């Protein structure tokens, strides 16, 4: 692997993300926001808590899809940005390096300390994530433990990263090359595990 | 006094903090999809109310902490700082058209949610800025030392439905 992960995290975490005079943060071909992490976690928890048990799975899927779409477009914006070109691109030798670099940026953005631990190109990826902000949702749950694994953002973004790597040319409409992969969470800090684990595989169309 | 933003990245935990508040970067796709999710869930849960109240609760806490830590008690100064913080979060621009402790009108000529929605999907048949409205409710309650849910904020006009700017009515 050609990616110097620590160097990418150190340099990307220093990239300034400031609002312009309109109060917007245009960067990486999207409008960026910088909210308290608690906002995202709390809305997610309240929505999941508010629905009947029999439709929790459907609501969870909506949260995963929101992150998938976000990860697809913003992920593409990141790997085509001038910051990526300056910091990461010189280390990239192949598609897999792009994925390793993307998770280093993911870490620098404060989403969680994410690292690929297994990668079969265009087939399967396993990501280990320590200290991700979504795991803080447990602090609002009874007994400081979530009733289910709730890192929907990481699931969606991880599926999207594999789409970008192996799903074909980037499609701004998201119609042709998005959702070719899907991600399931197999371990969660929020449910008592020591780290989060995420398995991305090709989406079963049947 | 202008808003002071002490930003730092915790190298050990790889987390971003602004004035000791854990923050994360996301994009308009994520924020507008959360909004759409809240709207689409209307048949099973009052998602837009949850979104509005979550925004009000979290931002009220954020603003109140800032005012307390910096000993800011002047109401007008608090409102001005809350306007600046709205922009610092990337939420857009708030203009207080006619506003006091009893309510009034707030305008958003630029808004992350509205402009992001237009950029992503174009116009829609109803207002969508529940996050911004919740922030305005938080701004009022934190500035005037009132509990959350004191103020009700509703969009009278929306950029997403075709207005030149988003206008929110604040009532007690």
Image (tube, coloured by chain):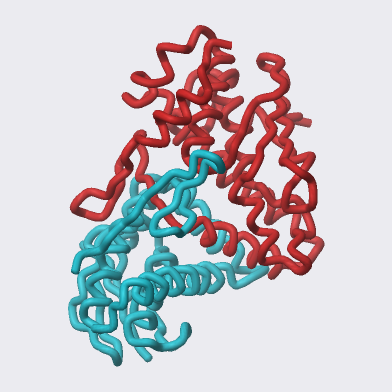
Chain colours: A red, B cyan
Where in the figure is residue B9, as x and y percent of width and height?
44, 44
The quadrant of the image that shows the N terminus of chain B is: bottom left
Residue found 76% across the figure and 60% down from its top: A145
Q: Is residue B108 left or right of residue B114?
A: left
Quadrant of res A195: top right
Q: Is residue A55 left or right of residue A116?
A: right
Residue found 53% across the figure and 11% down from its top: A2
User: Foreground: B40 or A60?
Assistant: A60
User: Foreground: A196 or A79?
Assistant: A196
Where in the figure is residue A193, as x and y percent of width and height?
79, 46
Looking at the picture, does residue A40 appear above or below residue B9?
below
Where in the figure is residue A176, as x and y percent of width and height?
54, 27
For the question of whether residue A62 can be seen, the reply is: yes
The quadrant of the image that shows the C terminus of chain B is: bottom left
Where in the figure is residue A104, as x and y percent of width and height?
52, 28
Q: Is residue B24 left or right of residue A196?
A: left
Outermost residue, top direction?
Answer: A93
Residue found 53% across the figure and 32% down from its top: A175
């Amino acid at each position: 692997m050609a990616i110097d992960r620590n160097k990418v995290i150190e340099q990307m975490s220093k990239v300034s993300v400031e609002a312009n005079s309109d109060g917007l943060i245009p960067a990486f071909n999207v409008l960026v926001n910088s909210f308290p992490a608690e906002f995202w976690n709390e809305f997610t928890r309240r929505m999941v808590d508010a629905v009947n048990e029999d439709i929790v799975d459907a609501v969870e899927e909506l949260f995963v899809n929101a992150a998938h779409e976000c990860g697809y477009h913003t992920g593409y914006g990141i790997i085509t940005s001038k910051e990526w070109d300056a910091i990461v691109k010189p280390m990239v030798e192949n598609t897999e390096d792009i994925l390793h670099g993307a998770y280093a940026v993911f870490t620098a953005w404060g989403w969680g300390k994410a690292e690929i631990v297994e990668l079969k190109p265009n087939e399967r990826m396993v990501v280990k994530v320590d200290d991700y902000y979504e795991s803080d949702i447990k602090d609002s749950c009874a007994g400081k433990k979530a009733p289910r694994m709730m890192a929907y953002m990481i699931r969606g973004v991880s599926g999207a990263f594999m789409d970008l790597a192996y799903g074909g040319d980037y499609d701004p409409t998201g119609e042709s090359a998005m959702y070719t992969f899907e991600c399931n969470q197999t371990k969660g800090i929020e449910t008592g595990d020591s780290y989060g684990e995420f398995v991305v595989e090709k989406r079963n169309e049947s | 006094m202008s808003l002071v933003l002490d930003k730092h990245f915790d190298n050990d935990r790889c987390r971003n903090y602004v004035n000791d508040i854990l923050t994360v970067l996301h994009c308009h796709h994520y924020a507008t999809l959360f909004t759409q999710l809240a709207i689409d869930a209307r048949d099973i849960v009052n998602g837009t109310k949850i979104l509005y109240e979550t925004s009000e609760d979290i931002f009220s806490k954020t603003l109140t902490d800032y005012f307390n830590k910096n000993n800011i008690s002047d109401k007008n100064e608090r409102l001005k700082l809350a306007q600046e913080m709205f922009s610092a979060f990337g939420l857009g621009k708030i203009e207080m058209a006619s506003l006091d402790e009893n309510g009034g009108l707030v305008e958003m000529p630029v808004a992350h949610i509205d402009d992001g929605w237009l950029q992503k999907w174009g116009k829609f048949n109803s207002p969508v800025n529940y996050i911004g409205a919740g922030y305005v409710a938080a701004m009022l309650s934190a500035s005037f030392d009132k509990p959350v849910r004191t103020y009700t904020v509703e969009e009278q006009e929306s950029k997403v439905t075709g207005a030149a700017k988003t206008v929110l009515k604040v009532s007690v």
